[in-house]
Image (cartoon, rainbow, N blue to C red):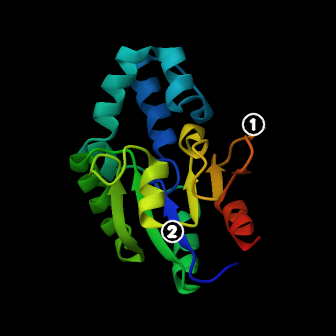
């Protein structure tokens, strides 16, 4: 692994298991059973509709649901290892500022907030896309669970993390696929 890499990490789906929370909300509120692999924005909207997705997102990214979201398996341990190895960690999120504050509280609850040099959202004015935020921060790597953010061509190393997914996904050029945090760590060593 390269030392002193500047690594950008999405919050929802990479650190906090938002997909599991979406699955639970859909089951509890819509009476539908979905695998968490079907809860990513575009696919989920195709299944439950845009109106229900917006209602769900408002609730899930609010304080109560954010604070009870489980950790993506092994995320905290791997983040601690990355930090101990001398890497610089940043969160790059699409959450609006108010909802980012809830994520910051969650990170503090999990005792991992101090691992990050900053939490940057695309609504703060340093970039309208995650690629622009990554460019502004001069990041070497972006790990995200939403392929749209990784297709933008920056940074050079981009990793799609779909924790526990049994699916095989065709990756565009320049994007690597990981099914868990251990695979993310392997890809960062390359």
Q: Residue at x 53, y 53 (%)?
A: 14
Q: Of residues 121 and 11, which is closer to you in this image?
A: 121
Residue highlighted by disc 1: 167
Q: Going from the N terminus, do you reach mark 1 or mark 2 first?
A: 2
Q: Residue at x 51, y 39 (%)?
A: 19
Q: Where residue 165 sits in the image (x, y, percent)?
A: 69, 42
Quarter of the N terminus within the rendering: bottom right
Quarter of the C terminus within the rendering: bottom right
Q: Where residue 189 sits in the image (x, y, percent)?
A: 73, 73
Q: Where residue 33 sits in the image (x, y, percent)?
A: 55, 22
Separation (CA) of disc 1 from disc 2: 24 Å
Q: Is residue 108 above or below residue 177?
A: below
Q: Residue at x 57, y 76 (%)?
A: 5
Cβ atoms under marks 1 and 2 closer than 8 Å: no
Q: Of residues 138 and 8, which is closer to you in this image?
A: 138
Task: Classify residue 55 as left or right of residue 32.
Answer: left
Q: Residue at x 47, y 53 (%)?
A: 10
Q: Where residue 62 sits in the image (x, y, percent)?
A: 26, 41
> In which image quadrant can residue 117 be found?
bottom left
Element class at badge 1: loop
Q: Residue furthest left?
A: 98
Q: Is residue 43 above or below residue 23?
A: above
Residue 68 bears which disc, if any? none
Residue highlighted by disc 2: 76
Number of other residues with Cα within 10 Å of mark 1, as a class: few under 14, some 14 to 19, many 20 or more? few
Number of other residues with Cα within 10 Å of mark 2, as a class: few under 14, some 14 to 19, many 20 or more? some
């Amino acid at each position: 692994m390269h030392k002193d890499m500047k690594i950008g990490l999405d919050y929802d789906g990479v650190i906090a298991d938002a997909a599991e929370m979406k699955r639970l909300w859909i089951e509890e509120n819509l009476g539908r059973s979905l695998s968490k692999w079907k809860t990513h924005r575009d696919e989920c909207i195709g299944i439950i509709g845009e109106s229900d997705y917006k209602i769900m997102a408002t609730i899930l990214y609010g304080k109560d649901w954010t604070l009870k979201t489980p950790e993506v398996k092994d995320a905290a341990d791997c983040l601690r290892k990355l930090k101990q190895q001398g890497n610089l960690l940043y969160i790059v999120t699409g959450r609006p500022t108010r909802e980012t504050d809830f994520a910051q509280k969650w990170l503090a609850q999990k005792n991992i907030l101090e691992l990050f040099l900053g939490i940057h959202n695309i609504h703060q004015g340093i970039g309208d896309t995650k690629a622009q935020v990554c460019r502004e921060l001069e990041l070497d790597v972006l790990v995200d669970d939403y392929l749209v953010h990784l297709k933008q061509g920056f940074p050079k190393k981009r990793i799609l993390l779909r924790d526990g997914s049994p699916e095989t996904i065709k990756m565009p050029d320049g994007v690597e696929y990981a099914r868990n945090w251990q695979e993310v760590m392997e890809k960062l060593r390359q």
